[in-house]
Image: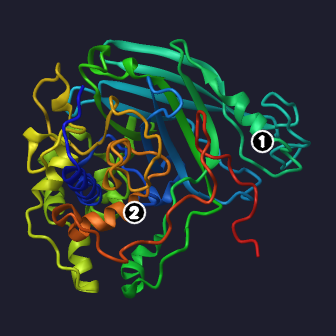
Amino acid sequence: MELRTNRRALVGIGLAAAVAVSSLAVLRTDSGIASSHREAPMISGDPQHDNTDVYAFVSPDKADSVTLIANWIPFEEPNGGPNFYPFAVKSRHNIKIDNDGDAKTDITYEWTFRNEDKRGNDTFLYNDGPVTSLNDPNLLFRQRYTLKRITPGGSKTLVDDGIVAPSNVGRASMPNYATLRNQSIKSLPNGGKTFAGQSDEAFFLDLRVFDLLYGGDLTEVGQDTTKGYNVNTVALQVPATDLALKGDPRRNPVIGVCSTTDKFNGDSFVQVSRLCNPLVNEVVAPAGLKDAYNALDPSKDAGVQALVDRVTDPEVARLLQKIYGIKAPATPRNDLVEIFLTGIAKQNGPIKADLNSQVLNKDAGKLRPSEMLRLNMAVPPAKNPNRLGVLGGDLAGFPNGRRLADDVVDIELQAVAGAALTGKLVPGLTDKVDRNDKPFGQTFPYIPLPSNVAVNQR
């Protein structure tokens, strides 16, 4: 597929897309709103089920495949023993794909976890000696998982006895954690790979945005709030043919990606968390709608007018005007509707470029607007990635999917301020956290190893 765009359109796409993420992502439904740490009242009290981030990108070292990453449990202090951070059991951890644009899930990758706890009444320790392998008898608590691929046509088990990489207790307990990570990566029947375990918190940002947008004068910037913390990660790398409509990524290159958590309530499974685009539920949905948003299915997005209104008239833009005097763009923000409800394509709205709407899929039917993290799998990995993604002229980055190194906070702040409409950045409007404190890996699963050092060390 040929991408038809130009430099000016790219700026519009990147900036507007970012705005949409901040404003319009509220409408989404597959539960993939990335970067939503403790974003809603109910889920803030249930961290095991709390989605924090979702990433989707063409694999930089294997361009015929796509890597999907979803994280859970925000702000894991590395020294948080003795029980550390297991995945929730009796729950379903999902990454969902819509490849035809009807806002209904076409493919679900579902992880379920179970515990093996040998401690009993003998010890309080997670391990009673150095752990040098996943099957080391010194590891007294471990988790196993089953991974299924579910479509309307049925379910297929891809992994039935995977072992989760344990929490990184410390250098005496786990002298070579990289070995444990490598052992936990499982090969899939179709040539793909999967991983489940603890990782570094790769989302970098200054979260003091909640203190009246960085103190009301941008003095509260430059501190990576998530530095040193860990998360629980599931990652998947599969051929693009496994994700594309009719298995044909040339004719149908665009997919929508979200992540959700389903919790068993005694009778059935109920969706309690969702995440797709960064910071959507946190800064777009009003407090009274946040819990409902976490339970919403994407096919319902466009029908919730109260949430649509928060996209077409984003609160963050009005706050920037009130606090910093940055004039809010005129409403309604139809550019945001295109970017995050329909995807970016010339036929969808004011942005005159074809990038990541499912209407670009030749075999797709009627499009149903829904908020999703959309990825065009035909865009090759960038040789020199730009942290500002499409805003920086890099079509392989956010909001065309999301890579680990994409600086979504800066992109979204600029977009909300109107850069998507003016084509100009607002000087100084940044959280001044431009990169993660740990480098990203060059091979799957790319996300850095978890820290074993206390966050509050002096």
Q: Earlier in the sequence, mark 2 or mark 1?
A: 1
Residue 177 is marked as: 1
In the picture, residue 105 is in which quadrant? top left
Residue 168 horizontal/vertical position (percent): 74, 48
Whether residue 360 sits left or right of residue 391 in the image: it is left
Left or right position of 439 against 31: right
> Picture coordinates of residue 202 (x, y %)?
55, 53
Relative to the observer, which residue lies in front, 122 or 105?
105
Instruction: Give the amino acid type for the residue marked by disc 2 in the picture.
Output: Val
Q: Which of 295 and 440 is in front in this view?
A: 440
Task: Identify whether 133 is placed above or below 246.
Answer: below
Mark 1: amino acid? Tyr
Q: Is mark 2 on a helix, strand or loop?
A: helix
| Disc 2: CA contacts within 10 A as few (<14), some (14-19) or many (>=20) | many
Q: Quadrant of residue 36?
A: bottom left
Residue 86 pos. (x, y %):
64, 43
Tag of residue 409: 2
Q: Counting other residues with Cα less than 10 Å from the Cα at mark 1, is it few (<14), some (14-19), or many (20 or more)? A: many
